[in-house]
Amino acid sequence: MMDVQHIVICLLTGYLFGMIPNGYLYGKSQGIDIYKVGSGNPGSTNISRTLGKKAGATVLLLDIAKTIVPILILHMAWKPATIDHGTLITLFTGFGAVLGHDFPVIPKLKGGKGVACTGALIIAFDWRFAVVLLALFIFVSYTSGYVSVGSITAVSAFFVLTAVLGKFGMLPFSGDIYPVVCGLSFIIAALAVWQHRSNIDRLRKGTESKFHFKK
């Protein structure tokens, strides 16, 4: 287990990187305030709708990077001796990045939904697991036409599969930290679903915008 001091360092390091407003900065570089167009969200989906899919892909990669980089930095700095220690560094730092993205303290910045950061956290946690969830996300998004539905499904599956696969030793942690990992994965998934509450409301009302994959 990690002590409180190391957990706080992980969360703060991730948070500082997570606050980097990639979507806003990219929009500004194109002369657009992303907060005032489309859904007003600085995430890659809204960037894709307003500036094109290449722009969306660029912001997506940048948001993935701002989650992966602090995880790598702390892994290199602390050189975890056990798989459990490495996993906790990854999860707490990644969660910090999600929090920084969703709830930045810098004035005038607006948070996003944290899907890309959550996805990056999962990639760092176990890339094979991430591939499965990515396939689920693509399948649900494509068949439903709603990226929000794919995102909600994938993050919910993240918690469920972490609890199930972790119980059978199929993920990179031991039974010693199983309760911590399950608890943290639940919080991460629940936060992602909560951040989609406006999408859920629009889905219920039938006003949610569809994503046109073939364009």
Image (spheres, rainbow, N blue to C red):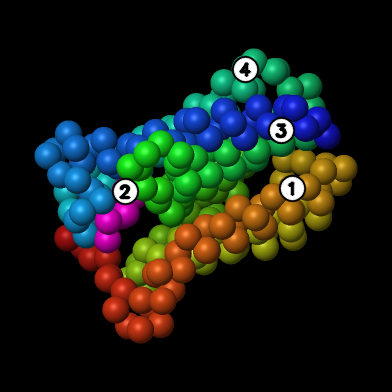
* CB under 8 Å between discs 4 and 2: no
Nearest to viewer (mark 4 / mark 2): 2
Ranked by sequence position, the earlier of labels 3 and 1 is 3
**Alpha-carbon distance for marks 2 and 1?**
29 Å
Residue identified by numbered label 2: 42
The residue lying at 81 percent from left, 51 percent from top is 179
Report crowding for label 4: few under 14, some 14 to 19, many 20 or more residues within 10 A (C-alpha): few
Ranked by sequence position, the earlier of labels 2 and 1 is 2
Report crowding for label 3: few under 14, some 14 to 19, many 20 or more residues within 10 A (C-alpha): some
Ranked by sequence position, the earlier of labels 4 and 2 is 2
Ranked by sequence position, the earlier of labels 4 and 3 is 3
**Alpha-carbon distance for marks 2 and 3?**
28 Å
* CB under 8 Å between discs 4 and 3: no
Question: What amino acid is found at the position of numbered circle 1 in the picture?
Answer: Val
The residue lying at 46 percent from left, 68 percent from top is 197
Q: Is residue 154 visible?
A: no
Main secondary structure along the magenta-highlighted residues: loop
Give the image location of residue 202, x and y in percent.
36, 76
**Alpha-carbon distance for marks 4 and 3?**
16 Å
Label 2 SS: loop
Q: Quarter holding the C terminus?
A: bottom left
Question: What amino acid is found at the position of numbered circle 3 in the picture?
Answer: Ile
Highlighted magenta segment, given as a residue range: 39-46
Residue identified by numbered label 4: 76
Question: What amino acid is found at the position of numbered circle 4 in the picture?
Answer: Met
Whether residue 96 appears in magenta in the rendering, the answer is no
Question: 147 above or below 30?
Answer: below
Give the image location of residue 148, x and y in percent.
40, 65
Nearest to viewer (mark 2 / mark 1): 2
Q: Quadrant of residue 54?
A: top left
